[in-house]
């Protein structure tokens, strides 16, 4: 204890200094605790400068909100997705009615038909119908219907297709004129049947005809009554184990997402032993399997 005793020895001058310091601290704490330092002057927030500045801020906010709103561009109503329908203001039931109609391989070809199928309100239809864009051949067909109605009302003879003797009953060799002999098939549909045939490298399955844009099931049945698959097309298959992403994506029944899943599965198993292994891929469209494997093989 004698060692620490000198530490507590202070002379009079040092003791006075310590007491003065403590007094200053106490006074400052008292002032801080009880003295109000706030200003009684109020800030005027109604000046012209502040009002103008607030107006500019509000204007910028309004512009930003308008920019964030989804903008509408011309679109084909047959391809309205769930998200697109939600943006347009359609209810879930209205969107489902359209999708159910489309699953029957049918297409909406007019504004009135769209409302008849979806049962949307007149106000919503008036807001979105100006953005509907139907294919040119649909517009042309509607005009032809109007012209035909005018001719019929004038007691004129309806004009029928010229008699044409078909050159073949092979659907993969038939010409445009051959297809036009079928009731319900005009120039536009005949061209579309041939274009889709070229895209598929030839019809391998009769059911592929039902995939032609704008060709109703009834008309397709009429075509298949006259034309059959006599000789199946020779298609050079792509080896799924060695093909590039772009080569697989060329398959008319494979989109980007499915192609990505196929390559992820290929990386996982290293190599497909049989093309039927594609069925093991999660969410693989089994209803399209017989069409997809027309163009793919596993070697």
Image (cartoon, grey):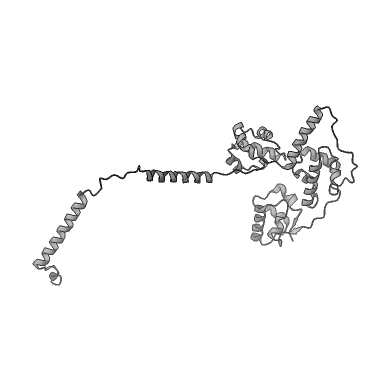
Looking at the picture, tell me which residue is in the foreground, 292 or 215: 215
Q: Which residue is drawn at 79% across and 43% down?
A: 188
Q: Residue at x 86, y 44 (%)?
A: 177
Left or right relative to 161: residue 266: left
Say which quarter of the image contains residue 95: top right
Say which quarter of the image contains residue 11: bottom left
- Quadrant into which the N terminus falls: bottom left
Image location (x, y in percent) of residue 250: 72, 55
Image location (x, y in percent) of residue 88: 59, 39
Tell how many labels: 0
Left or right relative to 111: residue 38: left
Left or right relative to 195: residue 258: left
Q: Can residue 29 be seen in this view?
A: yes
Looking at the picture, tell me which residue is in the foreground, 183 or 97: 183
- Looking at the image, which residue sits at the far bottom? 3
Q: Is residue 1 visible?
A: no
Image location (x, y in percent) of residue 140: 75, 39
- Quadrant into which the C terminus falls: bottom right
Looking at the picture, tell me which residue is in the foreground, 104 or 138: 138
Image location (x, y in percent) of residue 2: 13, 71
Q: Which residue is drawn at 52% across and 44% down?
A: 66
Q: Residue at x 76, y 33 (%)?
A: 146
- Looking at the image, which residue sits at the far left? 12
């Amino acid at each position: 204890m004698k060692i620490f005793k000198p530490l507590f020895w202070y002379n009079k001058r040092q003791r006075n200094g310590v007491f003065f310091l403590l007094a200053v601290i106490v006074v400052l704490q008292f002032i801080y605790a009880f003295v109000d330092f706030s200003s009684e002057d109020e800030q005027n927030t109604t000046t012209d400068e502040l009002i103008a500045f607030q107006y500019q801020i509000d204007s910028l906010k309004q512009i930003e909100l308008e920019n964030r709103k989804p903008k509408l561009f011309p679109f084909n109503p047959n391809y309205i997705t769930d998200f697109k329908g939600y943006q347009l203001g359609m209810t879930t039931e209205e969107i489902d009615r359209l999708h159910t109609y489309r699953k029957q391989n049918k297409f909406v070809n007019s504004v009135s038909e769209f409302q008849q199928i979806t049962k949307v309100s007149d106000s919503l239809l008036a807001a979105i119908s100006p953005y509907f864009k139907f294919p040119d051949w649909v517009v042309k067909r509607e005009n032809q219907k109007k012209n035909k109605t005018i001719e019929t009302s004038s007691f004129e003879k309806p004009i029928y297709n010229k008699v044409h003797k078909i050159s073949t009953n092979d659907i993969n060799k038939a010409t445009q004129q051959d297809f036009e002999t079928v009731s319900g098939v005009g120039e536009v549909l005949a061209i579309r049947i041939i274009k889709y045939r070229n895209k598929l490298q030839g019809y391998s399955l009769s059911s592929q005809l039902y995939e032609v844009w704008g060709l109703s099931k009834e008309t397709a049945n009429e075509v298949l009554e006259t034309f059959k698959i006599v000789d199946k097309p020779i298609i050079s298959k792509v080896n799924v184990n060695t093909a590039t992403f772009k080569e697989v994506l060329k398959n008319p029944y494979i989109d980007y997402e499915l192609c990505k899943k196929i390559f992820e599965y290929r990386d996982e198993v290293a190599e497909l032993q049989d093309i039927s292994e594609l069925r093991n891929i999660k969410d693989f469209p089994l209803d399209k399997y017989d069409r997809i494997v027309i163009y793919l093989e596993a070697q």
